Image (cartoon, grey):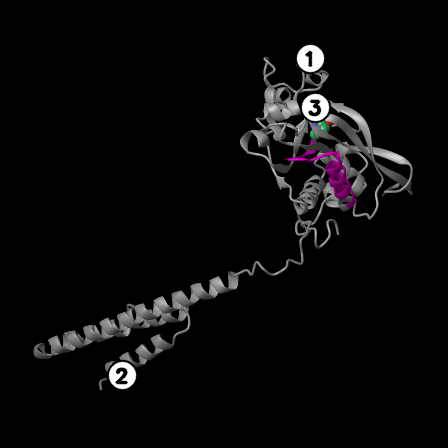
Amino acid sequence: MSEFEKKVIEYKERINNSKNSEEILSINSEIFGKNGIINYEFKKLGSLPHEEKKKFAANINKAKQELTDIFKAKSIQIQDKGIIEKVSKEKIDITLPEKDFKIGKIHPISQVIDEISCIFSEIGFSVEEGPDVENDYNNFTALNTPENHPAKDMHDTFYLDEDMKTLLRTHTSPVQVRTMMKGKPPFKIIAPGRTYRSDSDQTHTPMFHQLEGLHIDRNINMGHLKGCLNYFIKEFFEVDKIKMRFRPSHFPFTEPSAEVDIGYRLENNKIIIGEGDKWLEILGCGMVHPNVLKNCKVDPKKYQGFAFGIGIDRLAMLKYGIKDLRSFFDCDFRWLNHYGFDPLDVPTNYRGLSR
Ligand code: PHE
């Protein structure tokens, strides 16, 4: 075996044993570089007798081809290994619990909407949504609101056109209409969302949040309404007993109508729900007016039911001790950091709503 042949075997081994791309590249230049063994061997050609030249060159070319093939195969292997290692290092197990969540909080309003949806889903309500920009028909007319009703006044309603046909919904009740129009009874839905009225002081903001509830079926009565709200308030405030009172009221879309207050007392500036002799209004409700059912293609002789509209912001203030309604919408990062919720603290009925 010639010296060259021995070297070729040695290089084949070295290539095969190389561990990384730097190593294999340096071997490559030792073989194929200007001063590499291939060139070195070719240089010998000149001094050889003519008859030997052909065989000698063929030998070098064969070795060159073999080394090139091994080099290519090994390079690919090293490259693949690198990619696999990189990918395995970058792999994240998203099922592992995160320990260090410092950035990002869930706004108390979003949290309270999730809590409320959770509570109502437990007794068979599903969630509906409607647009913030409504038409006059869904917001007022279909809801049995007369043409000259004070709520239609410019001072209350944000109209979006001169004809007063398009507006920002003043309550979530138009979702009742949308739900009944697109389906067939029975209906059992809640609809949380933004609502707008031209009003601003310590307890009113031009944009606020409501949650509509609607339950239409055969033989639904005021007792069902009372039971439903009683259950909701207990679950929401996480207390065993509550004080609740129905005050007669008026809404064009319900008959009879009531406003519901809950009893509370103050202790060291903290609100204790279910005791004491103070009352706080939290929602409006009633039995859906037959005219509304008719407007929504539901036969009031066969079906009836209740509806309610809860002020979400107010409930959030009460439950989480937030004093000023306007702070909800200040976009103050420090405030959100204090009152906001951990993104992983998703409310569930089983684990507890607000732990
Ligand atoms: N939409 C009423 C309001 O905004 C609340 C309400 C809803 C009352 C459903 C009765 C039934 O004040």
Figure quadrant of the N terminus: bottom left
Q: Are marks 1 and 2 in contact (CB under 8 Å)?
A: no
Name, please, the residue furthest toward the left. Answer: 51
Residue 42 x, y percent position in the rendering: 20, 73
Name which of mark 1 and mark 2 comes first in the sequence. Answer: 2
Which residue is nearer to you in this view: 121 or 114? 121
State the image coordinates of residue 52 (x, y, percent, origin top left).
Answer: 11, 79
Upstream in the sequence, badge 1 or badge 3?
1
Residue beneath disc 3: 197
Decide if residue 235 is in sight here.
yes
Could you classify mark 2 by the number of other residues whose Cα lies within 10 Å: few (under 14), some (14-19), or many (20 or more)? few
User: Disc number at residue 148?
Assistant: 1
Q: Is residue 137 above or below residue 286?
A: above
Q: Which mark is residue 6?
A: 2
SS at mark 2 in the image:
helix
Q: Indicate the secondary structure of the residue bearing disc 3.
A: loop
Residue type, label 2:
Lys
Circle count: 3
- Nearer-the-camera pick, 199 or 329: 199
Can I make out residue 135 in this image? no
